Image (spheres, rainbow, N blue to C red):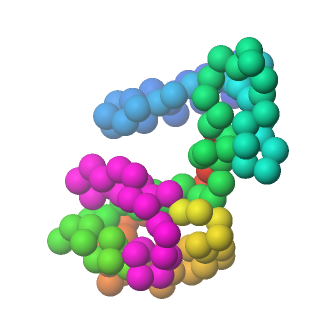
Amino acid sequence: MDPRARRFLWDCILSVIREGRSVVLTSHRALAARGGHCARDRDVSGPCRSVPPFPCRFGDGYTVVVRVGGPGPAAVETLMRCHFPGIVLKERHGGLLQYQLPSRAGSLASIFSVLAAHRVPCHIEDYSVSQTTL
Protein backbone atom coordinates (compact mmCIF):
# COMPACT_ATOMS: atom_id res chain seq x y z
CA MET A 1 0.00 0.00 0.00
CA ASP A 2 1.25 3.43 -0.79
CA PRO A 3 1.37 5.97 2.10
CA ARG A 4 -1.71 7.86 0.94
CA ALA A 5 -3.87 4.72 0.70
CA ARG A 6 -2.54 3.50 4.05
CA ARG A 7 -3.46 6.81 5.71
CA PHE A 8 -6.94 6.70 4.14
CA LEU A 9 -7.49 3.17 5.44
CA TRP A 10 -6.25 4.14 8.90
CA ASP A 11 -8.65 7.12 9.00
CA CYS A 12 -11.53 4.82 8.03
CA ILE A 13 -10.63 2.39 10.80
CA LEU A 14 -10.44 5.21 13.34
CA SER A 15 -13.87 6.51 12.32
CA VAL A 16 -15.35 3.03 12.85
CA ILE A 17 -13.73 2.83 16.29
CA ARG A 18 -15.11 6.26 17.21
CA GLU A 19 -18.60 4.94 16.41
CA GLY A 20 -18.08 2.36 19.13
CA ARG A 21 -17.61 -0.63 16.85
CA SER A 22 -14.80 -3.16 17.01
CA VAL A 23 -12.12 -3.67 14.40
CA VAL A 24 -10.06 -6.81 13.89
CA LEU A 25 -7.02 -6.55 11.67
CA THR A 26 -5.25 -9.58 10.30
CA SER A 27 -3.28 -10.73 7.32
CA HIS A 28 -4.16 -13.55 4.97
CA ARG A 29 -0.57 -14.73 5.29
CA ALA A 30 -0.83 -14.95 9.07
CA LEU A 31 -3.97 -17.05 8.82
CA ALA A 32 -2.58 -19.28 6.09
CA ALA A 33 0.66 -19.90 7.97
CA ARG A 34 -1.12 -20.90 11.18
CA GLY A 35 -4.40 -22.23 9.83
CA GLY A 36 -5.53 -25.47 8.35
CA HIS A 37 -7.31 -26.55 5.23
CA CYS A 38 -10.32 -28.69 4.49
CA ALA A 39 -11.22 -31.55 2.23
CA ARG A 40 -14.86 -32.64 2.07
CA ASP A 41 -15.71 -30.52 5.14
CA ARG A 42 -13.06 -32.20 7.29
CA ASP A 43 -9.91 -30.66 8.69
CA VAL A 44 -6.83 -32.25 7.11
CA SER A 45 -4.15 -30.00 8.58
CA GLY A 46 -2.15 -32.62 10.41
CA PRO A 47 -0.88 -32.93 13.97
CA CYS A 48 0.94 -29.57 14.20
CA ARG A 49 -2.13 -27.45 13.64
CA SER A 50 -2.22 -24.46 16.02
CA VAL A 51 -5.76 -23.18 15.36
CA PRO A 52 -9.12 -24.97 15.17
CA PRO A 53 -10.49 -26.03 11.78
CA PHE A 54 -12.34 -22.76 11.15
CA PRO A 55 -12.67 -23.06 7.36
CA CYS A 56 -14.60 -26.32 7.70
CA ARG A 57 -16.98 -24.99 10.32
CA PHE A 58 -17.39 -21.32 9.45
CA GLY A 59 -16.35 -20.76 5.84
CA ASP A 60 -19.66 -21.50 4.13
CA GLY A 61 -22.46 -19.14 3.21
CA TYR A 62 -23.05 -15.47 3.87
CA THR A 63 -22.89 -13.01 6.72
CA VAL A 64 -25.82 -10.58 6.55
CA VAL A 65 -25.74 -7.43 8.67
CA VAL A 66 -28.90 -5.30 8.86
CA ARG A 67 -29.30 -1.99 10.66
CA VAL A 68 -32.91 -1.19 11.53
CA GLY A 69 -34.47 2.08 12.64
CA GLY A 70 -38.00 2.97 13.61
CA PRO A 71 -39.99 0.67 15.87
CA GLY A 72 -37.31 -2.01 16.11
CA PRO A 73 -35.96 -5.15 14.49
CA ALA A 74 -38.91 -7.52 15.06
CA ALA A 75 -40.21 -7.13 11.49
CA VAL A 76 -36.78 -7.85 10.02
CA GLU A 77 -36.33 -10.90 12.23
CA THR A 78 -39.66 -12.29 11.00
CA LEU A 79 -38.80 -11.42 7.39
CA MET A 80 -35.45 -13.19 7.49
CA ARG A 81 -36.84 -16.35 9.14
CA CYS A 82 -39.69 -16.57 6.60
CA HIS A 83 -37.57 -16.05 3.48
CA PHE A 84 -34.42 -17.92 4.51
CA PRO A 85 -34.96 -21.18 6.37
CA GLY A 86 -31.77 -22.13 8.14
CA ILE A 87 -30.69 -18.54 8.84
CA VAL A 88 -29.19 -18.01 12.29
CA LEU A 89 -29.22 -14.75 14.23
CA LYS A 90 -25.65 -14.52 15.58
CA GLU A 91 -25.72 -11.07 17.19
CA ARG A 92 -28.27 -8.44 18.10
CA HIS A 93 -27.25 -5.05 19.46
CA GLY A 94 -30.16 -2.63 19.52
CA GLY A 95 -31.12 -2.16 15.90
CA LEU A 96 -28.10 -4.00 14.48
CA LEU A 97 -28.66 -7.63 13.50
CA GLN A 98 -26.01 -10.02 12.23
CA TYR A 99 -27.08 -13.27 10.58
CA GLN A 100 -25.28 -16.33 9.32
CA LEU A 101 -26.88 -17.87 6.24
CA PRO A 102 -25.71 -21.20 4.81
CA SER A 103 -25.20 -21.02 1.04
CA ARG A 104 -27.80 -23.76 0.48
CA ALA A 105 -30.47 -21.60 2.18
CA GLY A 106 -30.36 -18.68 -0.24
CA SER A 107 -28.50 -17.07 -3.09
CA LEU A 108 -26.76 -13.71 -3.01
CA ALA A 109 -29.32 -12.33 -5.46
CA SER A 110 -32.26 -13.50 -3.33
CA ILE A 111 -30.82 -11.91 -0.19
CA PHE A 112 -30.39 -8.54 -1.88
CA SER A 113 -33.84 -8.79 -3.51
CA VAL A 114 -35.64 -9.49 -0.24
CA LEU A 115 -33.81 -6.77 1.68
CA ALA A 116 -34.30 -4.17 -1.06
CA ALA A 117 -38.01 -4.98 -1.44
CA HIS A 118 -38.66 -4.66 2.30
CA ARG A 119 -36.38 -1.72 3.05
CA VAL A 120 -39.16 0.83 3.67
CA PRO A 121 -41.83 -1.32 5.37
CA CYS A 122 -39.30 -2.92 7.75
CA HIS A 123 -37.44 0.36 8.43
CA ILE A 124 -34.12 -1.02 7.15
CA GLU A 125 -31.54 1.78 7.24
CA ASP A 126 -28.74 -0.17 5.61
CA TYR A 127 -27.51 -3.69 5.11
CA SER A 128 -24.47 -5.57 3.93
CA VAL A 129 -23.96 -9.09 2.67
CA SER A 130 -20.56 -10.73 2.54
CA GLN A 131 -19.32 -14.19 1.87
CA THR A 132 -18.33 -15.89 5.10
CA THR A 133 -14.57 -16.21 5.42
CA LEU A 134 -12.07 -16.38 8.21
Q: Residue at x 51, y 28 (%)?
A: 24
In this view, 10 is above or below 71: above
Question: Percent position (x, y) of residue 9?
Answer: 60, 30
Q: Is residue 92 magenta?
A: yes
Looking at the image, the residue that sits furthest to the right is 39
Magenta segment includes 83: yes
Q: Is residue 125 above or below residue 29?
A: below
- In the rendered image, which quarter contains the N terminus? top right
**Residue drawn 60% across the image and 46% down it:** 58
Quarter of the image where the C terminus is located: top right
Asked which quadrant contains residue 35, the reply is top right
Q: Which residue in the rendered view is the most extreme toward the front?
A: 47
Q: Is residue 20 above or below residue 50?
A: below
* Camera-side residue of 82 and 94: 82
Q: Closest to the observer: 107 or 95?
A: 107
Quadrant assignment, res 42: top right
Q: Is residue 128 visible?
A: no
Q: Which residues are magenta?
A: 80-100
Judge by depth and name the residue closer to the eye, 120 or 72. 72
> Left or right: where does residue 78 sit relative to residue 45?
left
